[in-house]
Amino acid sequence: MITLDYKIALDEINHIISVSKNKVDDVLEFLFNNFEKYSWIGIYIVKGNDLHLGPWRGKQVTEHTKIPIGKGICGSAAKSGKTEIIPDVNRDPRYLSCFVSTKSEIVVPIKKDKKIFGEIDIDSDRKNAFSSVDKEFLEKIADMLSLHI
Ligand code: SME
């Protein structure tokens, strides 16, 4: 169930999407500025057999700007079409490390016409940062963004 703060955030994101010229960038900016546990947020887009990094927000750039579908947490979510929640990245052998500070990760596919178009990838410096509420919240945002990217 989505709690009140997330509901307010969804309303705000709806508003950003309806008025902004740079919808994806501004949604990322909003999430990065308002959810402290979202330490790094990026959008990957499917191109052929790979995921390519698009807009992102965070302190550092990642070396993983191109990830083959099927590889890493990002590639796994792109292959299955299902959200991945990794409570402790150091315990998942698929994990491709970007930042030493990252402790947990969520990857949410973005679908267009039932096909995987891309995904939202969020790293957190906190262990076990992502709950089913984050999943529901971010899946709604992925649906909203899919109409605009
Ligand atoms: N950790 C990801 C790679 C992308 S970085 O987190 C930005 C993975 O395992 O696929």
Image: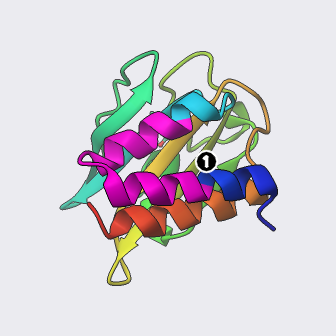
Coordinates of residue 105 in the picture (x, y in percent)? 62, 40
Q: How many C-alpha atoms fall within 10 Å of the one at disc 1: few (<14), some, or many (≥20)?
A: many
The residue that mark 1 highlights is 106
Please say if 43 is above or below 40: below
User: Quick check: is 140 in the magenta stretch?
Assistant: no
Coordinates of residue 79 in the picture (x, y in percent)? 43, 66
User: Quick check: is 12 in the magenta stretch?
Assistant: yes
Q: Which residues are magenta?
A: 10-31
How many marks the image carries: the answer is 1
Coordinates of residue 91 in the picture (x, y in percent)? 73, 37
SS of the residue at dot 1? strand
Task: Residue 65: name its quadrant.
Answer: top left
| 127 on left or right of 7 | right
Q: Residue at x 64, y 59 (%)?
A: 137
Q: Residue at x 42, y 51 (%)?
A: 16
- Residue 69 seen in render: no
For the N terminus, give its image quadrant.
bottom right
